Amino acid sequence: MEFFEHPLIKAQSIEKRAYQERLINSVLRKGSTLVVAPTALGKTIIAAVLAAHFLGKGKNVLMVAPTKPLAMQHQKTLKKVLNIPKSEIVLITGAKAPKQRYLLYKKARVISATPQCIENDIKQKLIDLSKIGLCIFDEAHRAVGNYSYVFIARKFKEQGSSLLLGLTASPGHEKERIAEICNNLGIKNIEIVTLEDEDVKPYISEIKLEWRKVELPEEFKQIKKALTDFIRENASKLKELSVTKA
């Protein structure tokens, strides 16, 4: 078994997988990237290896996630694999007062945070984005409309010196939505990984399914009948109005 080797990655802490190495090299070569990959393929590990690369260049790293539990999970993973003092990998959420957050930013090299909190701290000038070389957006498909990801990415684009990495398992099927996400994050490069890729297959365990039919409880049957009747009644009305032929 091979492992990623870097002075800022703990020895034998990250198994080297071909598809992850391919994605990491692509990001470093092409710049800001949206990585689309199924759940459980280790997108956070890709982020961690890239974080080590930027930390080695004297830049800080910011990783934003939609919820506090996710941000906490990322902080835990980064502490586990990055070879820097754990005190320099901080969690930023609204649970901490602005003064506390300001002090944490001063000592942090890696920040795991919720986006709303980062948006507020940018507006209040508590965080210096110029020190951040890599910003990672977990669940990047949320970067639409007025979501905080859009604001944060715009501020990074204005300063123009940071690499932005979007991670998602479900960007949507419409080209327009994917284009909107990439535009909002200032991303031109898209890397898509599937379970059918040759360099992914060796790491996927075969899933065995066994289907078992069960009898629904009487209460469930009544609910099912009520829903079916409701749908049929409305479908008939739509047909009468020539809205649908079905």
Image (cartoon, rainbow, N blue to C red):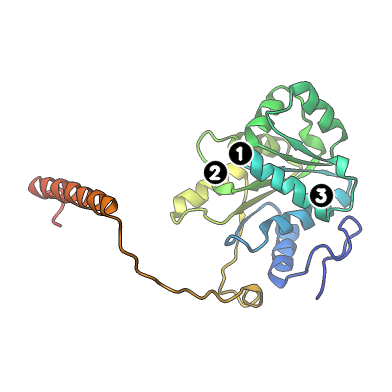
Q: Mark 2 points at which residue?
A: 142
* Badge 3 amino acid: Lys
Q: Which of marks 1 and 3 is nearer the N terminus?
A: 3
Q: Position of residue 128 (x, y in %)?
A: 79, 31
Q: Where is residue 129 in the image (x, y as percent from the top left)?
A: 76, 35
Query: Label 1 near label 2: C-beta < 8 Å?
Result: yes
In the picture shown, does residue 109 fall above or below 244? above
Q: Earlier in the sequence, mark 2 or mark 3?
A: 3
* Badge 1 amino acid: Tyr
Residue found 75% across the figure and 64% down from its top? 25
Q: What secondary structure is found at the residue carrying circle 3?
A: helix
Residue found 65% across the figure and 38% down from its top? 68
* Badge 2 amino acid: Arg
Q: Whole-Å distance between the Cαs marked 1 and 3?
A: 24 Å
Q: Which of 130 and 21 is in front in this view?
A: 21
Q: Earlier in the sequence, mark 2 or mark 1?
A: 2
Q: Mark 1 points at which residue?
A: 149
* Tag shown at residue 14: none
Q: Mark 3 points at which residue?
A: 79
**Label 3: how many Cα within 10 Å (few below 14, some 14–19, many 20+):** many
In the picture shown, does residue 63 fall above or below 50? above
Q: Which of 231 and 2 is in front in this view?
A: 231
Q: Can residue 163 be seen in this view?
A: no
Residue found 68% across the figure and 34% down from its top? 155
Along the horizontal axis of the image, is 237 left or right of 87?
Answer: left
Q: Residue furthest front?
A: 218
